[in-house]
Structure formats: structure tokens, C-alpha cells
Image: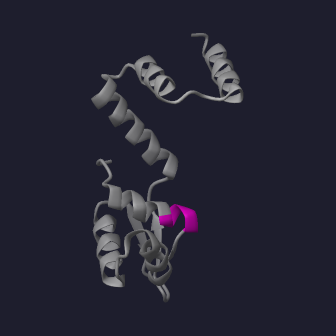
């Protein structure tokens, strides 16, 4: 999978949230965030289909557009790229940087401790 652009994330986000939709629904959802016209949305969906990011049901009318990849798979790939590029694969450094920037709640701290205990770190 290639790195997703911000615009591809926006399109996929709508498709994940809607569980797939017709062009009009996708356009309406994206218009609030992007201001894109119907033609712009159609262009993105068509290009994203060619990249294997979107599937288009060609049976029936209107055509239905769906994300061809799960949100979780895309998030995992983005995390991996970010971790490798920014932190040279050092997960601990990434976590430490986030914790220094923004403290976590007591509940989040307990969840993190539990996760680390389960991992036997």
C-alpha cells in the first residue's frame, strides 16, 4: 500500500463512516470539510479505485463506493511509516515523546501500565 495523501484519508474516512455510499452522499459529506464539487469527488474516487483504495459497485444504480481497505490496516501502515521515518523504529522514543508533549489521565496511565505488564516489558 502506498502512503495516503490527506485528501485520500478524507475520502476514505467518509467511506468508512458511511460503510459505503453513493456519489451524492460522499460529495455531501466531503463538501462540509473540503468544499469539493461532485466532479472533484468523482475524480478522487476514480483515481483511488485505480490505486486499489476504493471499490466501485458497477451493478445497479446509483453506483456504490466503498473503501477497499480497512481503517485499521491504513492506520497500522501510517503508524509504521511514521515510526520508521521519524523515530527510526524506536517505539519507546515515540511513546515518550507523546507523553512529554501531552500528559495522560490516570485512567489512561493505568491502561498503559496494564498493556506494558501484558507485554512483559
| Residue 18, horizontal then vertical, whole percent | 57, 68
Quadrant of residue 104 within the rendered picture = top right
Residue at the extreme top of the image, as rendered: 121
Q: How many marks?
A: 0
Quadrant of residue 111 within the rendered picture = top right
Image quarter hosting the C terminus: top right
* Residue drawn at the location 49% of the way across and 89% of the way down: 61
Eyeballing the image, is 87 above or below 68? above
Q: What span is colored magenta in the figure?
A: 14-19
57 or 39: which is nearer to us?
39
| Residue 41, horizontal then vertical, whole percent | 35, 76
| Residue 52, horizontal then vertical, whole percent | 34, 60
Eyeballing the image, is 53 above or below 115? below
* Residue drawn at the location 50% of the way across and 53% of the way down: 70
Eyeballing the image, is 15 above or below 106? below
116 or 62: which is nearer to us?
116
Quadrant of residue 85 within the rendered picture = top left
Amino acid at each position: 500500500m502506498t502512503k495516503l495523501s490527506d485528501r485520500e484519508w478524507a475520502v476514505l474516512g467518509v467511506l468508512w463512516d458511511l460503510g459505503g455510499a453513493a456519489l451524492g452522499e460522499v460529495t455531501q459529506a466531503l463538501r462540509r470539510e473540503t468544499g469539493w464539487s461532485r466532479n472533484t469527488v468523482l475524480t478522487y474516487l476514480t483515481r483511488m479505485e485505480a490505486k486499489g483504495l476504493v471499490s466501485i459497485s458497477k451493478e445497479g444504480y446509483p453506483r456504490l463506493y466503498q473503501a477497499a481497505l480497512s481503517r485499521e490496516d491504513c492506520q497500522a501502515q501510517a503508524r509504521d511509516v511514521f515510526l520508521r521515518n521519524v523515530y527510526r523504529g524506536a517505539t519507546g522514543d515515540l511513546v515518550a515523546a507523546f507523553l512529554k508533549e501531552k500528559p495522560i489521565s490516570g485512567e489512561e496511565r493505568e491502561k498503559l501500565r496494564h498493556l506494558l505488564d501484558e507485554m512483559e516489558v
